[in-house]
Image (cartoon, rainbow, N blue to C red):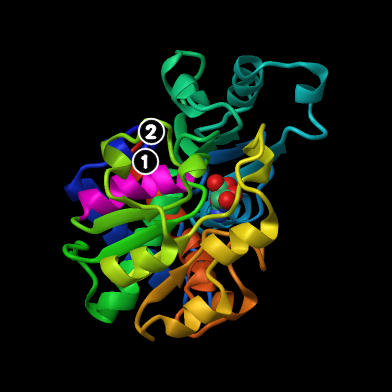
Amino acid sequence: MKHLISAADLSLDVTIALLDTTEEMSNVNEREIKKLPTLRGRTVVNLFFEDSTRTRISFELAAKRLSADVIGFTAKGSSVSKGESLKDTAQTLEAMGADAVIVRHHASGAAQNLATAGWISAHVVNAGDGKHEHPTQALLDAFTIRKRLHGAGSTGKNLAGVRVLIVGDVLHSRVARSNLHLLRTLGAHVAVAAPATLLPATPDALVAEHYFDLDEAIAKFKPDAVMMLRVQLERMSASFFPSAQEYSANWGLTRERAVALPATTLIMHPGPMNRGLEISSYAADAPQSTVLDQVRNGISVRMSTLYHLMAGDQQ
Ligand code: NCD
């Protein structure tokens, strides 16, 4: 594997291998000295054109824990604000010796472009491209579910029969798209619950199983995990729902809905959360919430990803 652009590109075998290595990396992350020499002398560049907290910091930590040198590049404060293109920016970074570029960009397809346009020869990892994909988020979500369900015996396991309900702003969510691909590859049963305005106008096979009522979805689908999506206000050019209060009442994981869930049903959210909109504080902080597990596992997943992409390179 040279690049990681889309969860749709990952076969079952490769996905299991990535999750199993994540397991090993999470053991490293529990040690007092959280460091492996694997990528010593390599350079990883974080190329972020969109805001990020978790993804950017966890890629940085992941690269550092594998002993790579890391350069953090954010569009704000760089020559991008002077109009420099993605191509020129990437080539400049490669001229400085980047072996891998982690890219987040508002344009769907930006990572794919970077990987295949022939501008650079470095590995490319998609850390979120517009409304398209965010494959390492799907990997960390799958890892989180697998770990909660199988504990220490997770290695080698898929998610056959696990029921995951993805709720909310599916239309604008790269997290949903990557999860729909990856969870299905792992054998999970995935459905979405969203208002009609926040589903693609012509629902494709990806969102074939959908509900237009959250309470009905929970009652009928009986999810093992409820994955709440952030309402992507920055990607909305029009009004997709009447008011925040109405969205929260109809589509939010309110205290009442969270209390009614079985104690074993996982509550997931990729962050950043709009508390009080798509998720109540009660649900976010409930014992079955995996929100902080997801953040923790993000570091291990990204170590695994960098390891699989880079460790075999000729020095
Ligand atoms: C997500 C993203 O940026 O796609 N956040 C993340 O990476 N943890 C989800 C979001 O912004 O809603």
What residue did someone put label 2 on? 3
Q: Which residues are magenta?
A: 173-186
Give the percent coordinates (x, y) of residue 188. Answer: 22, 58
Give the percent coordinates (x, y) of residue 221. Answer: 27, 65
Locate residue 10 relative to residue 56 in the image: left or right: left
- Residue 224 or residue 5, whichever sits in front: 224
- Residue 277 or residue 134, whichever sits in front: 277
Locate residue 155 relative to residue 92 in the image: left or right: left
- Examine the structure image and report whether residue 169 is included in the region drawn in magenta: no
Name the residue rendered at 33%, 47% in the picture. 180
What residue did someone put label 1 on? 309
Q: Which quadrant of the view contains residue 17?
A: bottom left
Locate residue 310 relative to residue 181 in the image: left or right: right
Secondary element type, mark 1: helix
Name the residue rendered at 40%, 42% in the picture. 177
Give the percent coordinates (x, y) of residue 11. Answer: 21, 42
Name the residue rendered at 46%, 32% in the picture. 124
Which of the marked residues, 1 or 2, is nearer the chain's N terminus? 2
> Which amino acid, mark 1?
Leu
- Badges 1 and 2: C-beta atoms under 8 Å apart? yes
Name the residue rendered at 28%, 55% in the picture. 190
